[in-house]
Structure formats: C-alpha cells, structure tokens
Image (tube, rainbow, N blue to C red):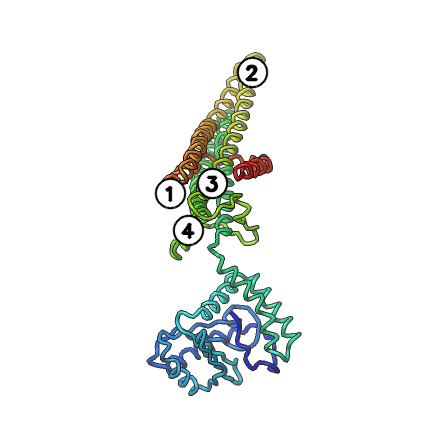
C-alpha cells in the first residue's frame, strides 16, 4: 500500500496532534456522502492516521469507499463533486479513484474509491487495525512521521516515500500472521505456559501436604479449622491450575499437528480454520523471538509424504531422548526422597521418644500422600510408556521408507506420534537445554549419512 502522491511536489506537510473531533467530523462526512450517492451501495471506512486514537499526523481525514458495484463509480464521483470534492487521480489497474476536499476551518478530507475486493483497500484497513491494536507500533509510526515532516515539510511526495518502508513492513508482518514461524512460536509459548501451570499445580499439592503435616502438631479446634480452610483453598487453586494447564497444552498440541501438516505437506488451511486455530492461542508472542521453520525442523526435503515422515522421525527422535532422560531423572529423585524418608523414619524409631516418633511418622505419611497425589510414580511410568511407543514409531518409519513412503503410512505415523506425545507428560524443562546440542549434532550427522 502507498498513499497517493500524484502531483504532491511542493505541497506543505505539517504534523498535528490527534484531535478528538476527528471522529465526529468523519461521521458527519460519511452521512453526507451516503445521502449524495444514493442508491449506490458502499462501505465507508475511516482510515489513515486520524482513524487511530492518539496518533498524530496531517490534519486530513482519509475515507475509504468500497463500492459494491464498480460500474457506478462515475456516478458516485459526480455526486462527490456536488459536495466539493475534486478528483486528483483515476487509475484503471488496479481500479481506484482519489478525491480531495478542503474543509475550512475543520480538517480536510481525502476519499479513496475502490471496488469491494480491492487489495489497495484491504491494505489500508489492515494497516489501520495493526496501529490501533499495537500502541508501541503507533508510537513508532508517529515518531517517524514527525521526523519526516520536519525534514520534508515542503515535499509531500518525499514525505510519503519515507513512510512506505514502514508501512510495507507492517503489511508483510500482518500477511504472515498465520505463517508457520508464528505457529511454531505460539506452540512453544503455549507449551511453556502449560508447563508453568503444571509446576504451580504441583506446588499447590505440596502446600496441601505441608498443611496436613503441620496440622498434626496442634490440638486446638480453631487452628485445625484454619488449617482445613487453607487446605480447601489450596485444593481449589490446584483444580484451577490443572484446568489452565490442560487448556494451554491442548492449544500447543493442535499447533504441533498443524505445523507437521503445513511444513510436511505444504498444506494450506482455509482462512476460517486458521482463524479458529490462532484464536485458541492466549499467550502473547510479541517481543518473543520467532521459532523459524528452518531451525525447528532440520529436514530439507520437498513438500510431500516423504518429508512428513522425516519430520515425524526427527520429532520422534528428539521426544524419545527427552522422555527417556526425564524418566531417569524423576526416578532418581524419587528414589533419593524415598531413601531420605526411610532413613528419617528409622532414625526416629531408634532415637526419638514415642510421641515424637508418631508425629514424625504422620509428617512422613503426609509427604508420601503428596508424592502419590502428585502422581510422581505415574509420571515415571508415563515417560517410560511414551518412550516405548515412540521407539516403535521410529521403527515404523524405516518400514514406510522401504515402501516409498505411501500416503497412508505417513499419515498414520503422524497420527500415532501425536497421540503418543499428547498422552505423555512434559519432559523436564531443563532437559531440553541439557540435551539440545548433542541431539542436534547427532541428528545432523544422521541426515548427512542418510543422503549419501
């Protein structure tokens, strides 16, 4: 998109602060245009800087008129002339008309006439909405315009060209709103948030266990009631955290499935499907480094079922190692805790009075209840089950390769891999950093040998 610059040389440019009166002036002008252009059917949108609350710029209100019937354009132009508009530009490809009207003492008006499906018009609306939704972006745009107005105050054409790079970048970013790089970034953000909620949920369970353990040292009824209330609140918090954890994980799982299809097969989903997918993401990614497809997936195969199978193989290779390592670490920690508990109980039996020993035993039982309620043992089994299932999937990739990667095999591999990952617990957060370089090197070497 670019703003009209025909015949702009020598026209003065001035930068003004945003005026609350722009909205009322726009509404009044829109009504006048509709009345004069009847019965032509049209959509009239307020675009440009004056359409963005708080954004400074030239005191000119831009109106975008999208005609439902472009054959009526000459009649609409004639009706605008009765309101004082002067036509400045008429383009045939893409079709567009540009008119201006001086409006002393209020703001001037620019009118951009386009067909209903005009890319030019869509760009204007997208740019306006991006600025409205991102105050920091709007601030940068205002700062750029103020600098350009100071430098090119007597040359509107140069002022407009100075904005084009910024406008183009915003439009490119908006066009890539549903791109795979953003999809992968949303996937990572949703999984990170899900893991965080899972950690908080475990802490809430630990809090319940701590309350139960501490309560054994009090015989006061009021104190016991307070302990019970605290335990109830922590249990309610745990339920809420678990629900949030599952919501974020579900969004991340869907992103992974879509990413595999998009990167593997070059699949293109409908606009409605993409919108629904991205609407599920609730963790903002602004300011977060994008997860580029080329970094996320090492495969360089062309789109097709062979590439999809290779992406599944790569993902399964990483997941297998992360699940196996996580299982070993959780098991080691659990055994260490069990050893400490057993030693504490044994030492208590040998050295402490009977009443104290009973209290210690109650605390240890509370800790044991926590370990069971947080399903630490279940997590170990789940990691191991996922490891076995994913190892089988890797073997099946070799079978599919021998058969030339038929469509059914590749799709079933992807489906089974997703099912295995979605039923598996998260790998421990630090395990990825621990294994990242090693796994990357091993996988690159594997691909290099595979191609020979």
* Mark 4 residue element: loop
On the image, numbered disc 4 is attached to which residue? 267
87 lies above or below 288:
below
Q: Quadrant of the C terminus?
A: top right
**Sequence-first tag of 4 and 2:** 4
**Residue 268 position within the rendered picture, expressed as x and y whole percent measured from the top left:** 41, 53
Residue 373 visible to the viewer? no
Q: Nearer the viewer, mark 3 or mark 4?
A: 3
110 lies above or below 426:
below
The answer to which image quadrant residue 158 occupies is: bottom right
Q: CA distance from mark 2 to mark 1?
A: 64 Å
On the image, numbered disc 3 is attached to which residue? 310
- The residue at 44%/39% (across/down) is 242
**Sequence-first tag of 1 and 4:** 4
Q: Nearer the viewer, mark 2 or mark 1?
A: 1
Q: Nearer the viewer, mark 4 or mark 2?
A: 4
Relative depth, front residue between 446 and 163: 446
- The residue at 49%/43% (across/down) is 191
How many residues crowd mark 4 within 10 Å: few (<14), some (14–19), many (20+)?
some
**Sequence-first tag of 2 and 1:** 2
Q: CA distance from mark 3 to mark 4?
A: 16 Å
On the image, numbered disc 2 is attached to which residue? 348
* Mark 3 residue element: helix
Q: CA distance from mark 1 to mark 3?
A: 13 Å
């Amino acid at each position: 998109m670019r703003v009209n610059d025909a015949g702009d040389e020598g026209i003065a440019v001035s930068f003004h602060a945003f005026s609350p009166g722009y909205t009322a002036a726009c509404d009044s002008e829109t009504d006048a245009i509709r009345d004069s252009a009847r019965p032509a059917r049209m959509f009239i949108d307020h675009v440009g800087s004056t359409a963005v609350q708080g954004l400074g710029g030239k005191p000119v209100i831009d109106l975008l008129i999208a005609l439902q019937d472009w054959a009526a354009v000459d009649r609409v132009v004639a009706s605008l002339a009765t309101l004082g508009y002067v036509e400045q530009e008429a383009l045939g490809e893409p079709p567009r008309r540009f008119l201006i009207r001086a409006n002393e003492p209020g703001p001037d008006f620019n009118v951009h006439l386009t067909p209903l499906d005009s890319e030019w018009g869509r760009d204007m609306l997208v740019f306006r909405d991006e600025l409205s939704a991102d105050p920091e972006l709007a601030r940068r745009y205002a700062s750029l315009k103020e600098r350009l107005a100071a430098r090119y105050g007597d040359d509107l054409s140069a002022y407009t060209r100075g904005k084009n790079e910024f406008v183009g970048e915003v439009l490119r970013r908006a066009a890539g709103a549903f791109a795979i790089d953003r999809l992968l970034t949303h996937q990572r953000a949703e999984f990170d948030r899900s893991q965080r909620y899972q950690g908080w949920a475990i802490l809430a369970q630990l809090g319940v266990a701590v309350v139960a353990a501490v309560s054994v040292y009090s015989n006061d009824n009021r104190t016991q009631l307070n302990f019970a209330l605290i335990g109830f609140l922590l249990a309610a918090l745990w339920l809420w955290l678990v629900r949030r954890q599952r919501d974020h994980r579900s969004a991340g799982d869907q992103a992974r499935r879509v990413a595999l299809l998009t990167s593997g097969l070059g699949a293109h989903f409908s606009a409605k499907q993409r919108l629904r997918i991205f609407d599920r993401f609730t963790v903002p990614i602004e300011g977060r480094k994008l997860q580029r497809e080329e970094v996320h997936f090492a495969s360089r195969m062309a789109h097709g079922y062979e590439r999809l199978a290779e992406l599944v193989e790569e993902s399964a290779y990483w997941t297998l190692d992360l699940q196996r390592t996580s299982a070993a670490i959780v098991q080691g920690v659990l055994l260490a805790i069990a050893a400490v508990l057993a030693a504490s109980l044994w030492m208590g039996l040998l050295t402490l009075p009977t009443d104290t020993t009973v209290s210690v035993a109650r605390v240890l039982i509370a800790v044991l209840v926590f370990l069971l309620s947080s399903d630490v043992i279940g997590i170990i089994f789940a990691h191991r089950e996922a490891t076995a299932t994913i190892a089988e999937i890797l073997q099946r990739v070799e079978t599919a390769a021998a058969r030339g990667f038929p469509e059914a095999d590749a799709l079933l591999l992807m489906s089974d891999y997703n099912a295995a990952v979605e039923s598996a617990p998260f790998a421990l957060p630090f395990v990825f950093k621990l294994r990242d370089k090693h796994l990357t090197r091993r996988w690159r070497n594997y691909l290099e040998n595979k191609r020979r």
